[in-house]
Amino acid sequence: MNALDPQNMPDLHDMWADAHVSYSSPTGPNTACSSNPLAEQSAVWHARLTETAPNGALLVENGMFDALRNHDTLHLLHVTHSLDRIVRHGTLRPSGGCLVGSIYCAPLASTAMGLRMHNLAEYILTEEAPTAVARSPLPGRTTTPLVLEITMPRHSYRGLTGIDYLRMGAIHLRNYLEGEFLLGRHERYHLREAVVGCVKNSADFLHLAATIALVPEPAELKAFPRLLTEAIPRLPVLGYIYFEALSEYLMLHSRSARTQQLAELGEFNNLLSKRLLYEGLPGTTGHFELAHFRPDFTRLDELLARIDPTIEATHARAYLTARISYLTTACLLGPAAPPEQWHRIRWRFDHVAKFFGPLAGHLIHRALRRFHRYPDFYHFYDQVKAFQAWNYWNQMDIPLPFNGTIPKGEIGVNPAYPDLQYRVWTAELGDDRLLHPIQELPLRLTPRLVGTQYTLMRDRRTSARKVESGGNCSLTDSNI
């Protein structure tokens, strides 16, 4: 029996369930995985994040969660640079890179004077999107805020379950195995060999991370910064994990006046993660690549002091060592065998996929995105993944999926939800810093993907011709 045959893999619905995080569970946030080998450690992390971190209460109670649980009507901001195309075609479409296949938005709060933007929404509209447009090869592009009014059906799910892109590796692997013959024989061979080589040469870091995650007080940590820095170029998903862990730490542990002000509004301070991105990857405003995120772990003092002087770097390093190790083990390593058995691994693709299946999936996913025949077939993988996500969300009755890595305000609209009621307006930002709807647009939310190469917030170095042919994905750093 071929263990890599997709027919022998777990049920697809279960795989998508494992890629989501439940914030409704009294022991959560936690994955819905029924065979989580880190269940005990996950519960300990939940207590540590929610009860010990200064802003940990926002993981349980925040403005977005309150709206999802209790409001029948929600207002969301979507930012576009292609209003002319949207109006001409009469459709608002998702991107394969935005919350899997959602129409990417951020929350708005209704007030008597207008719509107050979540701080993430305000940053995207007033700073990030204009900067991205300014870097576009097409002249004359402008950012336009759209207000989506979503009426929640009575039967829709009111629990809190978000998608965590770090936990989608097994899905990436399965989808590749089902479509690998889109590649030629030599292409498949070189791809598999590259995956094996990257994992094999990063085994020291993976072993150390798994040991730290499984043992409360590991004996040796001195090698961690060096091994992490060496492993990120071979395992680019570690750059994403590093960024998410450090962003999480900043948002949970900041004591700045701005952070406290936003916490009173039920919001994490997203500017911290944005500043981290642009301080950690200088020159990336408007486009970025988290796979390159690897600030010197031993010199976090200077970086964190620039971002938020209330952060204590020594505590941050200890936290990151434990958190990166936990996320690496929980998200990238399969449960086939504990680290002490890894010396028995045969460095062949089938064995690597057995021991490190999610990691292999992430490596393949990234390799396909950068493959020299990317324009010919990659969109098929994105479309299949979106179909699967829409099907899962519809089965679970989820009209508004959100980024469950940390609930910082990234929320999407499921364009395939059958009973969705919505209205769309153009809007303008007033001197009062509130959004005011201006003109209602007769648009349909359509479950048909716009290619990720057409978004402005990614460093794909696309030509003007490719961007011109594109659609209306929102401007976002999401790589789900």
Image (tube, rainbow, N blue to C red):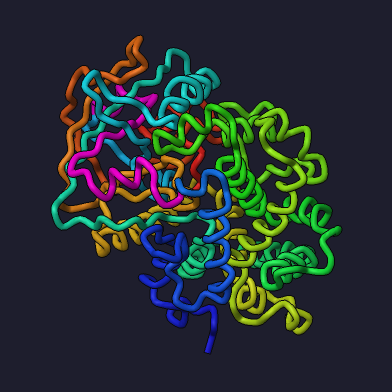
Q: Residue sitting at 52 percent across and 74 percent down?
A: 36
- In the displayed structure image, the side of residue 34 where residue 219 appears, left or right: right
- In the displayed structure image, the side of residue 91 where residue 376 appears, left or right: right
Q: Nearer the viewer, residue 84 or 146?
A: 146
- Residue 263: where, in percent of width, then height? 46, 36
- Residue 347: where, in percent of width, then height? 74, 76
- Residue 136: where, in percent of width, then height? 51, 22
- Residue 353: where, in percent of width, then height? 61, 73
What range is drawn magenta here?
59-88
Q: Is residue 343 magenta?
A: no
Image quarter of residue 199 = bottom right
- In the displayed structure image, the side of residue 328 where residue 442 appears, left or right: left
Quick check: can you spot residue 184? no
Q: Nearer the viewer, residue 127 or 370?
A: 127
Image quarter of residue 71 = top left
Q: Residue sitting at 78 percent across and 50 percent down?
A: 229
Q: Decide: is 42 above or below 430.
A: below
Q: Residue sitting at 73 percent across and 62 percent down?
A: 198
Q: Residue sitting at 42 percent across and 61 percent down?
A: 20
Q: Decide: is 157 above or below 459.
A: below
Q: Is residue 82 magenta?
A: yes
